[in-house]
Image: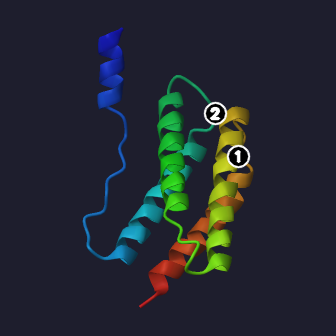
């Protein structure tokens, strides 16, 4: 039993930190990872022996990234923007948790649209 747990732990998907000194490029990469994780979660929403691990690992990865993004918000710089970002990340987090339980995609579709817009906004800044 312990070997099985150890092997599962070793094979857990990890979040690969972007190799760049450019904060904007790093943020775009993080958003790409988040969107890819949510997409993988949605694609594997119906539990089966083939999809359960992928659903669980992509769910966990997405939540980890969301917690990281929420924790990095600077509320002192621009409170309005900070609150809006926090609300979008929180909406996404709650949507994923609800969908994990219900096995039905719903609110995360709206969340992905909002997250994609944020990602594109960062990408378009010169």
**Residue 74 percent across, percent down from the top left:** 53, 71
Q: Residue 105 carries which label?
A: 1
- Residue drawn at the location 65% of the way across and 46% of the way down: 96
- Does residue 75 appear left or right of residue 23 in this picture? right
User: In which image quadrant can residue 66 be found?
Assistant: bottom right
- Residue drawn at the location 43% of the way across and 70% of the way down: 28
- Residue drawn at the location 53% of the way across and 52% of the way down: 67
Q: Nearer the viewer, residue 32 or 30?
A: 30
- Residue drawn at the location 57% of the way across and 39% of the way down: 44
Q: Which residue lies furthest to the bottom in this view?
A: 126
**Residue 53 percent across, percent down from the top left:** 48, 30
Q: Mark 2 points at which residue?
A: 46
Q: Which of 111 and 89 is in front in this view?
A: 89
In the rendered structure, which disc, 1 or 2, sits on the residue that comes first in sequence? 2
**Residue 31 percent across, percent down from the top left:** 47, 64
- Does residue 82 appear left or right of residue 15 in this picture? right
User: In which image quadrant can residue 99 be found?
Assistant: top right
Secondary structure beneath label 2: loop
Q: Which mark is residue 50?
A: none
Q: Which of 22 and 52 is in front in this view?
A: 22
For marks 1 and 2, give the CA distance: 10 Å
- Does residue 84 appear left or right of residue 76 in this picture? right
**Residue 75 percent across, percent down from the top left:** 58, 72
Secondary structure beneath label 1: loop
Count neighbours of disc 1 (C-alpha within 10 A) and say few if under 14, some if 14 to 19, many if 20 or more: some
Count neighbours of disc 2 (C-alpha within 10 A) and say few if under 14, some if 14 to 19, many if 20 or more: some
């Amino acid at each position: 039993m312990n070997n099985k747990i150890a092997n599962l732990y070793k094979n857990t998907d990890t979040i690969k930190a972007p190799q760049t000194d450019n904060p904007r490029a790093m943020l775009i990469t993080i958003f790409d990872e988040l969107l890819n994780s949510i997409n993988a979660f949605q694609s594997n929403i119906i539990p089966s022996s083939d999809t359960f691990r992928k659903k669980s690992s992509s769910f966990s990865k997405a939540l980890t990234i969301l917690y990281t993004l929420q924790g990095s918000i600077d509320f002192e710089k621009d409170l309005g923007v900070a609150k809006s970002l926090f609300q979008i990340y929180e909406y996404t987090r709650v949507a994923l948790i609800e969908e994990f339980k219900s096995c039905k995609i719903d609110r995360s579709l709206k969340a992905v649209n909002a997250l994609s817009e944020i990602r594109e906004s960062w990408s378009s800044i010169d």
